[in-house]
Amino acid sequence: MRNLIDVEKTMAISDFWIFFFATNFPNALDCKTDRTLTEMIEEKYSVSRDWVNTFTQYDKNMLIINDGYLENPNTFKIQLFSSNVLTIEFHSGDTIYFINDEKLGCTGPHFFIQKISFLHYCELVSLDRWENKVLLLPMVRISRNEKEMFKKLIYELLIKLPFDQDDNAFIQNAVIKNCSSE
């Protein structure tokens, strides 16, 4: 059973986007500085720990009993323009992605990312709102030939997010690294 939450209301909270970028790109590294995206975000941005704990339904006992996985996780269920349904479950130690209720991947400690090609990603969300495009980014796999197009896409998405413009290049490079198949 999933606890379906109001996607619009949640995405309107800047803490959500900061939390999302800090936790959903496990291989996001800026090669120039050798810093992870998570490290940069933790150093520069503050997110309400109470908000995160409420959103992920964090409970110390649940971590011990179920390794952080919930029976009723807070979940986004989003109808994409492509007629596919994107479902994202937010657990306290993992984010699990589904397309049409088929597990796609996850970003937690045993992450399983780069599950869809950039071409397939574009087919899934090309006509969708920018928020949906951002939500599916952690599952994208890009090739060397696609880096420039992907870089442009990330830039267009980042200007809509609650990050300082000065940090966009760092975030962009880290997300590219996270999604690079090489």
Image (cartoon, rainbow, N blue to C red):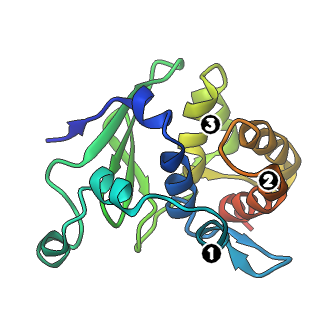
Q: Quadrant of the N terminus?
A: top left
Name the residue type under label 1: Glu
Whether residue 42 appears in this view of the structure is yes
Q: Is residue 109 left or right of residue 175?
A: left
Q: Choose mark 3 or mark 2, whichever is in front.
A: 2
Crowding at mark 3 (Cα within 10 Å: few <14, some 14-19, many 20+): few
From the image, tell me which residue sits under label 2: 168
In the rendered structure, which disc, 2 or 1, sits on the residue that comes first in sequence? 1
User: Percent position (x, y) of residue 168?
Assistant: 79, 53
How many numbered marks have been drawn onto this rendered protein structure?
A: 3
Q: Where is residue 112 in the image (x, y as percent from the top left)?
A: 46, 63
At label 3, the amino acid type is: His
Question: Mark 3 and mark 1: span between their CA atoms?
Answer: 30 Å
Contact (CB < 8 A) between labels 2 and 1? no
Mark nearer the N terminus (3 vs 2):
3
Front in this rendered view, residue 78 or 104:
78
Q: Nearer the viewer, residue 154 or 9?
A: 9
Q: What element carries label 1?
A: helix
Q: Residue 182 carries which label?
A: none
Which label is found at residue 120?
3
Please name the residue that numbered disc 1 is placed on. 39
Q: Quadrant of residue 133?
A: top right
Amino acid under disc 2: Asn
